[in-house]
Image (cartoon, grey):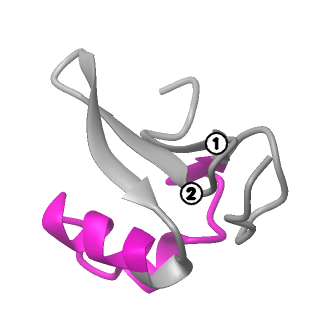
Amino acid sequence: MTSAPIVVHRPSPSGGRRVTVHRDGRDEILGTAYSDHDLVVFLEGAGVADPEAVLDDPQWLEWRGSPAHEFSAA
């Protein structure tokens, strides 16, 4: 694997960050997260066993376009 399977994209102009997971050769949108709690819920739904443990693990999750854990409007 060349990058993390889960990407938290840059904040949108209205706030929140799109979350995608790469599996089965394609990217799937999990939703728009407005907080770490939202992100954890999406990761649980995607089958991540301990989602809180991967939030800062670059092998699992890549934060793009803004610092990690920031969800406010761009």
Queried whether the magenta region covers residue 52, the answer comes back as yes
Q: Secondary structure at mark 2?
A: loop
Q: Quadrant of residue 3?
A: top right
Question: Residue 46, position in %: x, y?
Answer: 18, 58
Instruction: Give the residue type that dot 2 points to.
Output: Gly
Q: Which residues are magenta?
A: 38-62
Circle 1 residue = 12
Please, which residue is most extreme toward the front here?
14
Label 1: few (<14), some or many (≥20) within 10 Å?
some
Q: Relative to residue 10, is residue 40 depicted above or below?
A: below
Q: Is residue 9 left or right of residue 28?
A: right
Inter-mark Cα distance, 1 to 2: 6 Å
Q: Residue at x 39, y 75 (%)?
A: 38
Q: Are marks 1 and 2 in contact (CB under 8 Å)?
A: yes
Residue 47's label in the rendered image is none
Looking at the image, which is closer to me, 56 or 36? 36
Please, which residue is most extreme toward the top here?
25
Q: How many marks?
A: 2
Instruction: Give the residue type that dot 1 points to.
Output: Ser
Q: Relative to residue 11, is residue 20 depicted above or below?
A: above
Question: Residue 60, position in %: x, y?
Answer: 50, 54
Q: Secondary structure at mark 1?
A: loop
Q: Relative to residue 9, is residue 34 depicted above or below?
A: below
Circle 2 residue = 16
Queried whether the magenta region covers residue 39, the answer comes back as yes
Q: Residue at x 23, y 77 (%)?
A: 49
